[in-house]
Amino acid sequence: MPEKLAKDLYLLRVRLPRFKPPVLNAYLVAGDRSLLIDMGLYSLGALESLLAELGELGFRPADIDEVLATHSHIDHIGLAGIVAECRGAPVKMGAEECSILKEGGFQGYMDKVARVLAMQGIPEEVVRGMMASIGDEYPVPGVRRLYTEVLPRSVSCVLREGDTVEAGRYSFNVYVVSGHSPGHVVLHDPDHGVLVVGDHLLPKTTPQVSPLTPEDNPLARYLASLDKLERLDASLVLPGHEEVYRDHRARIRELRRHHEERLREMLKLLREGPRTALDIASRVKWNVDYASWDEMPPMDQYFAFAETISHLNYLVAKGLVRWEDRSGARVYLLSGQRGTE
Ligand SMILES: [Zn+2]
C-alpha cells in the first residue's frame, strides 16, 4: 500500500525479489507535473509491485510527467526501459552518473573492479568468485544487456547540480553527491523541508563506498558530500530503502563516527604489523550476521573488501599509511613503520 507522507507526496514500496535489501522506496509527487523518483529492479516481480503501488493511487507509468533515477544501481533504475517505453520519454539521471551507460561502460566498469582486486594480490579464484557475484547474471539475468542496450536508450543523462525539478506543489533543487556512486542525485525542496537522499544517506545501513581505480578515494568524496548535505534544512528525509526519517544531520554525525571508528580499527590492525587489504578485511568487525569471513558469501566479501580498500586509500591520501608491492600484492604499513623484507 502506498503511504501518504505529505500533501501530494507518496511513498511506494516496490518489492525487489531475491535482492538485498528486499524493498525499494520509490516516491510519487502528484499534482500538475507529476514526478516518479526511482523505479525498482529489472524483474517482473518488481514491475508488478510498482504497477500495483501506482495503481492504488490511480496512476500508470504513462500518466507520469517526469521520471528520474537518483543513481545507476539496478534496484533504482532497472525498470527505466519499461517506464520510458510506457511514457514515450526517457528517464532522467545525473550527468556524472552515466559513465556506466556509455559505450564500453559496463565492461569498463567490470574491468576496473577486476583491476582493483588484482592490484591487491587477491588469489585468482577469489577474484573469479567476487566478479561472478557482481557480474552478468546478478542480481537478475540480463544485467549486461540492460546496461549496454536497454538503459542507454531509455535514460537521459541531463541532471546537474543547480538544476530545478518542478513537480506539483514541490520545487526541488538538484545536488550531485559522490562516494556511493559517481554522480548520485539528491533533491531538496527548501520550502517544504523535503530531502530525497536515495542510497547516499540511508537511516540504518552504512552506504557502500567502492573504489573504481586502485588509488581512488571514494570515502573522501563521500565525507565531503555529507558536509554539503548537512548545510541543507530538512524535516522529511526520503531514503531509497528502509524507513523515512526526520533528522539527516543526526544521521550524518553517526555516519562520520562510523567511518572514524572504522579508520581507527584499521590503524590498530596495522600497528600490529604490515598487512594486506584482504588480511585487514577478514579481521574487521563487519556489521553482518556471519560468524566468520569464510562464511560470508562472495558478494558480501566483495563489498567488505571494497570498503576496506576505500578506507586504506583514504589513510594513504592522509599520509598515515603507505603500501609496498610485495610479489604483486600491496602490503600496507603505518607511515612510520619500516618494511620487513
Ligand atoms: Zn539501492
Image (cartoon, helix red, strand yellow):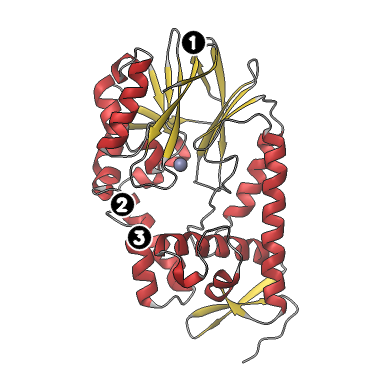
Residue 168 badge: 1
Q: Secondary structure at mark 1?
A: loop
Left/right placement of residue 245 relative to residue 268 reads left
- Of the pair 63 and 330, the residue shown nearer to us: 63
User: Do tag 1 and tag 2 residues touch (Cβ < 8 Å)?
Assistant: no
| 33 over 88 or under it: above or below | above
The residue at the point 61 percent across, 47 percent down is 222
Report the side of 32 relative to 316 (left or right).
left
Query: Which numbered circle lies on residue 133?
Result: 3
Query: Which dot, 1 or 2, sits closer to the camera?
Result: 1
Mark 3 Cα shell of 10 Å, populated few (<14), some (14-19), many (≥20): some
Residue on which the image places disc 2? 104
Quadrant where the image shows the C terminus: bottom right
Determine the residue positioned at 28% across, 48% down: 140
Residue 157 visible in the current orientation: no
Residue 25 lies, with reference to residue 302, above or below; the image says above
Foreground tag (3 vs 1): 3
Q: What secondary structure is found at the residue carrying circle 2?
A: loop
